[in-house]
């Protein structure tokens, strides 16, 4: 089993930055992809970014150039640095990990005002 705990959400003005963290605990050695999804009010959950065990990164087009995903293996932590935030980035951000099964964190709220 793997547990994922997110932190770092909050309120921001458009153009500001936030950094999300996701700490993984438990049987983490089998994880080969970790990433972030988000869900805006009234919308479906969408994929935002991912990082593989080999540090390959991918992003949804709407955040390219503004968001950066990274990992600190010593701390079992994945980060999402979010710069130049926009109101449309508002939503609950979920940490996601893929091993033999898919794991989800509980989510952290990000609210961006214009």
Image (cartoon, grey):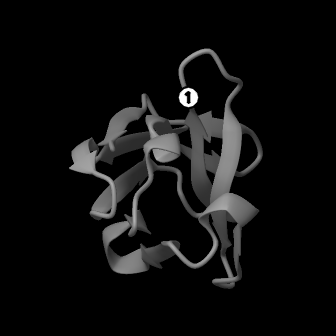
Q: Quadrant of residue 92?
A: top left
Q: Is residue 8 left or right of residue 71?
A: left
Q: Is residue 113 above or below residue 12?
A: above
Residue sitting at x 33%, y 37%: 111
Q: Quadrant of the C terminus?
A: top left
Residue at the outermost front position:
114
Work out whether residue 26 or residue 73 is closer to the camera in this orientation and state it: 73
Residue sitting at x 72%, y 51%: 99
Q: Position of residue 42 (x, y in %)?
A: 62, 15
Q: How many marks?
A: 1
**SS at badge 1:** loop
Work out whether residue 66 or residue 33 is closer to the camera in this orientation and state it: 66
Q: Is residue 7 left or right of residue 23?
A: left
- Residue 52 at least partly seen: yes
Q: Position of residue 32 (x, y in %)?
A: 70, 65
Residue sitting at x 74%, y 64%: 61
- Residue 60 at least partly seen: no
Work out whether residue 34 or residue 38 is closer to the camera in this orientation and state it: 38
Q: Position of residue 90 (x, y in %)?
A: 44, 38
Residue to which mark 1 is pinned: 40
Q: Residues within 10 Å of mark 1 (few under 14, many from 20)?
A: some
Q: Quadrant of residue 34?
A: bottom right
Q: Is residue 27 left or right of residue 34?
A: left
Q: Is residue 89 above or below residue 62?
A: above
Work out whether residue 21 or residue 102 is closer to the camera in this orientation and state it: 21
Q: Quadrant of the N terminus?
A: top right
Residue at the outermost top position:
42
Q: Is residue 20 above or below residue 64?
A: above
Q: Is residue 62 above or below residue 109?
A: below
Q: Position of residue 41 (x, y in %)?
A: 54, 19
């Amino acid at each position: 089993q793997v547990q994922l705990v997110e932190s770092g959400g909050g309120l921001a003005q458009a153009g500001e930055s936030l950094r999300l963290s996701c700490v993984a605990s438990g049987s983490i050695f089998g994880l080969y992809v970790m990433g972030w999804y988000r869900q805006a009010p009234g919308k479906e959950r969408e994929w935002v970014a991912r990082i593989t065990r080999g540090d390959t990164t991918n992003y949804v087009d709407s955040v390219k150039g503004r968001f950066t995903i990274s990992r600190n293996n010593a701390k079992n932590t994945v980060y999402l640095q979010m710069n130049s935030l926009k109101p449309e980035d508002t939503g609950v951000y979920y940490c996601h990990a893929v091993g033999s099964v898919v794991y989800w964190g509980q989510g952290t709220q990000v609210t961006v005002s214009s």
